[in-house]
Amino acid sequence: MAARVTREAYVADAKSGTGLPASLEVAWGLRERPAKGPRPGLSLDRIVDAAVRIAAAEGLGAVSMGRVAKELGVSTMSLYRYVGAKDELYVLMQEAAVGAPPEAPPSDTGWRECLAWWARAQRAVFRQNLWLLRIPTSGPPIGPNSLAWMEAALAGLDGTGLREEEKLSTLMLVGGYVRNESVLMSDLEAGTRARGVAPDESLRRYAAALGALTDAERHPAITRLLGSGVFEHGDEADTDFDFGLDRVLDGIEVLVKSRR
């Protein structure tokens, strides 16, 4: 995968075919948007917006071509003039939700700060659009917004001395950490809401259960953990995220120093 993918490169590729679905070529500006059909006002943007609204309100599982068509008051078949399949719609929904990355730190900012900025910005997008976490990862990023995020992360690694394949692996490592942490926190929060208890109360109940199920002889480490009072008050979610991110970046730093 190239470290930098420009629109000009895609335009060049379009002469021989990009291999992208028509709707993604529209997103890249490589293909004219379909002319309006018999349903005035129906467009690719309206289809994607409706799908995003459904996902935000009811979860990704509620999104189907039929459900989107019903939302728009059109036949299901009319959507296929714009979008070839539901998986293709998922990609377009993701593009719409993630948007372009926020303004990057100044060019003289260190690589570690750049990656931390990128990771926190990605996490913020996930936290605002939890349904994104349920989209299956079926391939590398290919939409214009997704590649803009990829470019921002790779550009932050300029000057580290890492090989290009190492930069890509670093991006996958940090991105994977962000996604996995976001999924975990989303699932925990959903479970807490389903039980109808506050997070601190849920933690207190967990500590009480551990105390009843363990003893110092069989579970000395857990006993020490309980005795430390760590479960008496929960840490902020950002604290746990920052701790894990710092440890990931510590490992990358070892590699960067070895390259220098």
Image (cartoon, rainbow, N blue to C red):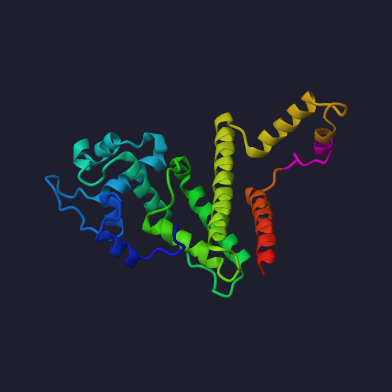
**On the rendered structure, is 217 left or right of 209?**
right
Identity of the residue drawn at 61% across and 33% down: 197
Magenta span: 224-233
In the image, 151 versus 19, the foreground residue is 19
Quadrant placement of the C terminus: bottom right
**On the rendered structure, is 207 left or right of 37?**
right
Q: Position of residue 259 (x, y in %)?
A: 66, 66
Quadrant placement of the N terminus: bottom left
Task: Decide if residue 99 is in sight here.
Answer: no
Q: Position of residue 236 (x, y in %)?
A: 66, 48
In the image, 26 versus 134, the foreground residue is 26
Identity of the residue drawn at 38% across and 53% down: 95
Q: Position of residue 202 (x, y in %)?
A: 66, 34
- In this rendering, the answer to whether 137 lies above or below 1 is above
Task: Name the residue furthest right.
Answer: 217
Q: Residue 90's quadrant in the figure?
A: top left
Q: Residue 148's quadrant in the figure?
A: bottom left
Task: Decide if residue 190 is in sight here.
Answer: yes
Task: Name the residue furthest left.
Answer: 38
Q: Position of residue 10 (x, y in %)?
A: 32, 62
